């Protein structure tokens, strides 16, 4: 991906769902760009369209209309196989509920996306677990970890394929305030190292930690909302 090309360029993204006879606009003409190295929070009330937008940015859903370019590639022109490859090679995902495999060790969970990509990962797993301060837990399983530790494992897993972009869905949603702050601190450190991060959040502290906020209301992007860059 070119350093000059926006990591994300969205133009008039619209997503319409049918609910019986009516149409529901989950997204309504959303346009924005995210440059390499940005830390952006997507905020707004429940039902504003945040998760729908994140799913589209992650190539897990498609807009009804509009265009999306990720790293210069127009997503709509890609077949399913190419979209899967784009996700695998360029995007890391962090979820509210961690999404760890309960039967796998910490190290095996971190390595899993790389195994799907047929990459050798032994050194990379050690580096990432050291980075998130969990190398001493590498042989443990998820049920032996705290919530904060599980989320740090999930973040390490999201980084295993060296993505250009990490998408996070309510990454502090299941954590207490102190633990959530440790995750926010980790995201800020990763961003300062050059990682592009986009997170959906209801957490005002997480939103404030981002360098910019995209505020959604009823599927539309608010222009120049108070308190955002």
Image: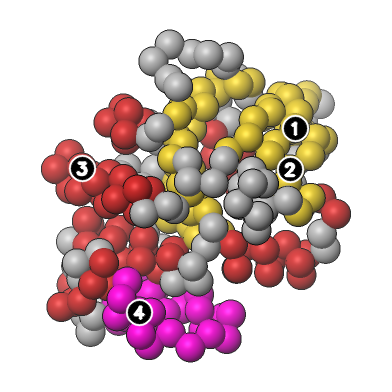
Real-space CA distance between mark 3 and mark 4, rounded to the nearest whole angstrom: 24 Å
- Check the image and name the residue furthest to the right: 77
First to last magenta residue range: 100-128
Number of numbered discs on residues:
4
Real-space CA distance between mark 2 and mark 1, rounded to the nearest whole angstrom: 6 Å
Residue 81's x, y, as percent?
76, 70
Point out the image quarter for the N terminus. Answer: bottom right
Point out the image quarter for the C terminus. Answer: top left
Asked which secondary structure carries label 1, the reply is strand
User: Label 2 belongs to which residue?
Assistant: 68
Residue 125 is covered by the magenta coloring = yes
User: Mark 1 or mark 2, which is nearer the start of the sequence?
Assistant: 1
What residue do we see at 49% from left, 32% from top? 42
User: Mark 2 or mark 4, which is nearer the start of the sequence?
Assistant: 2
Real-space CA distance between mark 3 and mark 2, rounded to the nearest whole angstrom: 32 Å
User: Label 4 belongs to which residue?
Assistant: 125
Q: Is residue 129 above or below residue 168?
A: below
Check residue 11 in the rendering and tell me which mark sits there, or answer none.
1
Q: Is residue 2 above or below residue 9?
A: below
User: Mark 1 or mark 4, which is nearer the start of the sequence?
Assistant: 1
- Check the image and name the residue furthest to the front: 4
User: Mark 2 or mark 3, which is nearer the start of the sequence?
Assistant: 2
Side of 111 relative to 15 (left or right):
left
User: Label 3 belongs to which residue?
Assistant: 181
Residue 177's x, y, as percent?
17, 39
Real-space CA distance between mark 1 and mark 3, rounded to the nearest whole angstrom: 33 Å
């Amino acid at each position: 991906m070119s350093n000059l090309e926006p990591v994300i360029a969205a133009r008039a993204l619209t997503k319409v769902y049918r609910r019986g006879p009516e149409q529901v606009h989950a997204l309504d003409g959303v346009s924005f760009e995210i440059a390499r190295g940005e830390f952006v929070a997507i905020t707004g009330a429940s039902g504003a369209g945040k998760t729908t937008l994140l799913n589209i940015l992650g190539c897990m859903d498609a807009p009804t209309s509009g265009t999306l370019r990720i790293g210069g590639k127009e997503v709509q022109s890609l077949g399913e196989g190419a979209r899967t490859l784009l996700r695998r090679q360029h995007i890391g995902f962090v979820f509210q509920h961690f999404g760890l495999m309960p039967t796998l060790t910490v190290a095996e969970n971190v390595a899993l996306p790389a195994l799907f990509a047929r990459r050798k990962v032994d050194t990379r797993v050690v580096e990432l677990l050291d980075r998130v301060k969990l190398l001493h837990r590498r042989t443990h399983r998820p049920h032996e970890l705290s919530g904060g530790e599980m989320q740090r494992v999930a973040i390490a897993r999201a980084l295993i394929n060296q993505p250009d972009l990490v998408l996070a869905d309510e990454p502090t949603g299941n954590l207490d305030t102190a633990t959530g702050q440790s995750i926010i601190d980790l995201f800020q450190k990763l961003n300062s190292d050059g990682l592009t991060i986009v997170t959906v959040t209801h957490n005002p502290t997480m939103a404030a930690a981002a360098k910019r906020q995209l505020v959604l209301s009823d599927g539309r992007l608010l222009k120049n909302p108070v308190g955002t860059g």
